Amino acid sequence: MKKFKFRLQVVLDMRENELEQRRIEAAKILAVLKQQEEKLADILQTAEKNKLELEELYNLETLDIPQVEGHRDYGLKLIIDAKNQERIIANTKSILEVKQQEVREAHQKVEVLKKLKEKQEQQYYKEFLDSEMKEIDDITSARFKL
């Protein structure tokens, strides 16, 4: 008996490679997203620390105006940085969604070919068993005719 050979195996292999590439791309974008979220958390933490330092300056007996203005300006800069970082995160999330959709589509293409391969393999073995049964029937018929 010769072994089953799927005619579209090359296409299946190509689609599996494409699926793997899409997964790698999505994983890279997810890693970038995590870094961006950590950066935002750092910015917010720095803003909170700056706010506490500014409150401490207000509680001192002598008010150092240039230092207060510096902390205030730095606080405003951190707020702008946080908003920009939030926009960057939103954009990265939308890119990630697109990549995840590409992964789903590539996975679906692979699954279609796998199901086709499975059906063809089942059909191949069914035909093989049918031909063996026919051959056994022919041999049995020939023996009883003698």
Image (spheres, grey):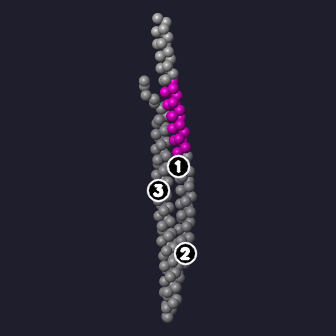
- Residue at the far bottom in the pictured view: 61
Element type at marker 2? Answer: helix
x then y, percent, for residue 20: 46, 47
Which contiguous range is marked in magenta? 107-127
Sequence-first tag of 3 and 2: 3
Q: Which residue is mark 3?
A: 28
Q: Does residue 10 appear in this view?
A: yes
Q: What is the x, y in percent for residue 146?
A: 46, 5
For marks 3 and 1 on the same chain, the one whose residue lies earlier in the sequence: 3
Relative to 130, say whether 143 is above or below: above
| Disc 3 from disc 1: Cα separation | 13 Å
- Tell me the kind of residue under disc 2: Ile
Tell me the amino acid under the disc marked 1.
Answer: Val
Which residue in the rendered view is the most extreme toward the front?
Answer: 144
In the rendered image, which quarter is residue 91 located in? bottom right
| Disc number placed over residue 62 in the picture, else none | none
Instruction: Say which residue label 2 marks.
Output: 79
Query: Dot 1 surroundings within 10 Å: few (below 14), some, or many (20 or more)?
Result: many
| Label 2 neighbour load within 10 Å: few <14, some 14-19, many 20+ | some
Q: Which residue is mark 1?
A: 103
Q: Residue at x 46, y 39 (%)?
A: 13
Residue 146, magenta (yes or no):
no
* Helix, strand or loop at mark 3: helix
Q: CA distance from mark 3 to mark 2?
A: 28 Å
Q: Residue at 48% of width from left, 38% of height from top? A: 12
The amino acid beneath tag 3 is Lys
Vertically, is 87 above or below 119?
A: below
Q: Where's residue 32, x and y in %? A: 48, 61
- Residue 134 x/y as whole percent: 50, 17
Q: Kindly indicate whether the residue at mark 2 contacts the one at mark 3 (C-beta within 8 angstroms).
A: no
